[in-house]
Structure formats: C-alpha cells, structure tokens
Image: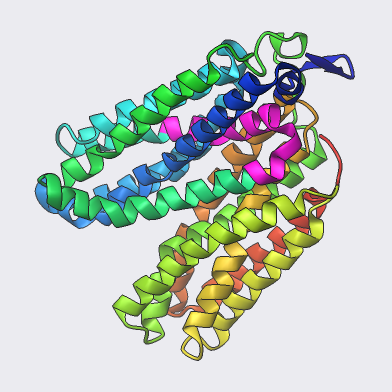
Amino acid sequence: MATDGGMFVHDDTRADQQSGVPALAGGALLMVAVVLAALNLRPSVTSAGAVLDEMRETLGASATWAGALTTMPGLCFALAGLAAPYLARRIGLNTAVAVALGVLTVGLVLRVLNGPWVVLGGTLVASAGIALANVLIPVVVKSSFAARIGLMTGIYTAALQAGGALGSAVTPPLGDAFGGWRAGLGSWAVLAALALVLWFGATRGRPDGVANTPETAGGGRSLLRSPLAWTVTLFFGSQACFAYIMMGWLPQVLLDAGVSRTAAGLMVGLVSLLGLPTSLLVAPLATRRGGQSWWVVGLGVFGIAGVSGLMLAPSAAPLLWSVLIGIGMSVFTLAIATIALRARTSADTAKLSGMAQGLGYLLAALGPFLFGLLRDVTGGWTVPCAMLLCVLVGQLVFGYLAGRPRYV
C-alpha cells in the first residue's frame, strides 16, 4: 500500500515488481480476465437487435415493446452505473466486478426463458450487470495497471467494440444452428459465465482495490462540486451521445441518401470496425505524455468532417463520410482513459467513473430521441445533423479541457 495525501492507494504494479514471476503471471491472467469481461459488455445489447424481428414475431410483441427493449440498456447504464462506486466501497472492487458478471449471466439466462415481460426483465437485469462493470473495469485498470493505463485502456475498449460486433454478427447463425433466437441469445450466457470463473481465478488473493481504506470507509468526498469532474462527465456524455445517434440513425440517413441496404449495412459495420485499430493505437500514444487534449481535438475534427459531409452532400461520398465518422467515434477510448488519468486514487477513479458514465449515458440516451424528433418535425436530415454538430463542438471543448493534466 502507498499513501497519497494521507489516503491509502492500492498499487498492484509495485507489488508485482517485488514478487517476481508469479506476480507477472498473475498480472497476465488479470489482463486476460479484463479482456474477457470487456467482450461481454456489448453482446447483450447488439445480439437482441440482430434477432429483434424474430423475437417480436414469436412473442407477438408490439413496436412499443421493441422500443422499450432497445432503450432500456442505455437508461440502465445511467442509473445502475451510479450505484457502482457505492458497491465497490462496500464489498471491494474485485468482488463488485464479480457481482456484475454474475448479474449479467443471470440476466442473459432469464431473458430467454419465457414471454415478452420476462425478456424485458432479463434485459433489465443483464443491463444492470453491464452498467456496474462499465464503471468498475476502468478502476481495475487504474489500480492494477497504473504504469500501462494507455495500453490497457486501448485493449479494453477494443474488446468492447469487438464484443459488440460479435453480438450482432454471430447471434443469427447461433440461433440457426441451435434452434432459434432463444438459443442464439442464451449462448452469450456461456461467455459471461466463463468470464466470471476466470475473474475469480485472476483476482484470488489480490488486494480488493478501493474497499476498507480510511478514505472510503465513510464514502469520502463528493465529486459533484468538482468542475473538472463535470467537465469529464460532459465530455463522456457528448461523445456517447454522438455514438448512440450514429449507431441508431446512420443506416437510415445512408438509405435516404440513395445507398443500397446492403451497402449501408457494410458501411455501418465499417464504422464499428474502425474503432478497433484506432483504440489500440491512439490510447497508448495519447497517454505517454501528461495531456490528451489535442488527441481529443484531432479525433473530433474527423467526426465533424463526417457529419458535415452527411449534412451538406450525403450522396457525394457516403463511404468517406462513414470512414470519417468511424474515426471520430473512436474518441471513446480517450473518454475512458481520461476517467483513470484525471483521478489520483482508485477510490476517486471509481467515483469519477460512476459520475461520468452514470450521468453521461443519461445524456446520451436523449440524443437519438431528439435526433429523430427533429427529423419528424423538419422532414429532412439537415437540422438533426446541425444539432449533432453542436454536440460534437461540445465534445471538442469539454474533451480539450478534460484532457489537460490535472486531478479531481
């Protein structure tokens, strides 16, 4: 244990240096556990979208039910995520992540057992597990990989994006192979259970992060009065709003621009795939120095260029606009890294992660609704895209300020 301003900070990196080869092996196992956990944090959402038509037909569910099913994860990310720091203080960081993975596993099983209300209930439970893990995994990166935050954040966010892509791509074939959408969706519970087992093995005997320290015993200070914490939150929320709008509406914008359904699907897939190499490259480079401001600005400019192209000349170069948007959306990896880099201790990282992701996802959940509302009111995509450009300008400003080397 090391102290920082009178507060205890767990530092697995120092412990690993002192204990030699066994600790290195333990660190490698924990790294694999983090990656496997990250792979589980998006398939619950994307797998349902891939078989939503089959689910509605089998269950006799309405469009309103489908809307609730697709909206629930984002709202749950916001609400359950706010509870994650408290849970980590009460039972320990490693145990809290195990609880999150366990809740996710139970939810994935529950949602394929019965009718439409059970599906909604299971989705709610699974999304709660994801929300907890969303907040807590960056704290694990901060406390256990302090010397490699950029690398681990890049790997973690790449695994998140890969899991999302796998959820949408693999679920239909799994359903075809094993007897329907229930089997396809239920198969993801196996991956979640494996992540839980590996997590137990990787964290056995390791100090439990933010629990049982003088700082966290009484809950510590609130970050709600910290201007920097609000800046990080608004940065995270604006980039998440951009991503949610593009994931939900980009296919329709491309179709209305004259792109075929097949080509539009390929372009949307490309947007997701571009995040993988960018996450692995940008995060380690951006965290080598004290600040990340200009990296955030650089990626933001790509997003602004892509959305401007969609607004002004959507049919001129839709592939180019999609590529630019995909690069711009990869600022997500810096939003995650910023949470760990702007806090001195694991306890503050947990609080900042809970605040930024809890309130940030709440902001993001409003974006697709407002984008669609503006489309209905105006009858075109110009005003909605102009609104999105305002979001991106906000992301640029808040990201620049959040990227400066300071602490909450």
Residue shown at 75%/30% (left/top)? 223
- On-image quarter of the C terminus: top right
Residue 93 appears in the picture as rendered? yes
Relative to the observer, which residue lies in front, 401 or 149? 149
Q: Measured along the vertical axis of the image, is residue 61 above or below residue 16?
A: below
Q: Position of residue 307 (x, y in %)?
A: 58, 75
Instruction: State the extent of the magenta-drawn residues as a range.
Output: 128-152
Residue shown at 77%/22% (left/top)? 14
Name the side, left or right, on which 361 lies relative to 63: right
Q: Measured along the vertical axis of the image, is residue 155 above or below residue 214?
A: below
Relative to the observer, which residue lies in front, 174 or 242? 174
Magenta: main secondary structure equals: helix
The image quadrant of residue 211 is top right
Q: Position of residue 196 (x, y in %)?
A: 41, 25
**Residue at the outermost front position:** 21
The image quadrant of residue 26 is top right
Residue shown at 52%/38% (left/top)? 78
Q: Position of residue 74 (x, y in %)?
A: 45, 45
- On-image quarter of the N terminus: top right
User: Is 133 covered by the magenta stretch?
Assistant: yes
Q: Position of residue 225 (x, y in %)?
A: 79, 32
Relative to the observer, which residue lies in front, 284 or 249? 284
Residue shown at 80%/41% (left/top)? 228
User: Is 377 covered by the magenta stretch?
Assistant: no
Name the side, left or right, on which 120 lies relative to 236: left
Q: Measured along the vertical axis of the image, is residue 316 above or below residue 356?
A: below
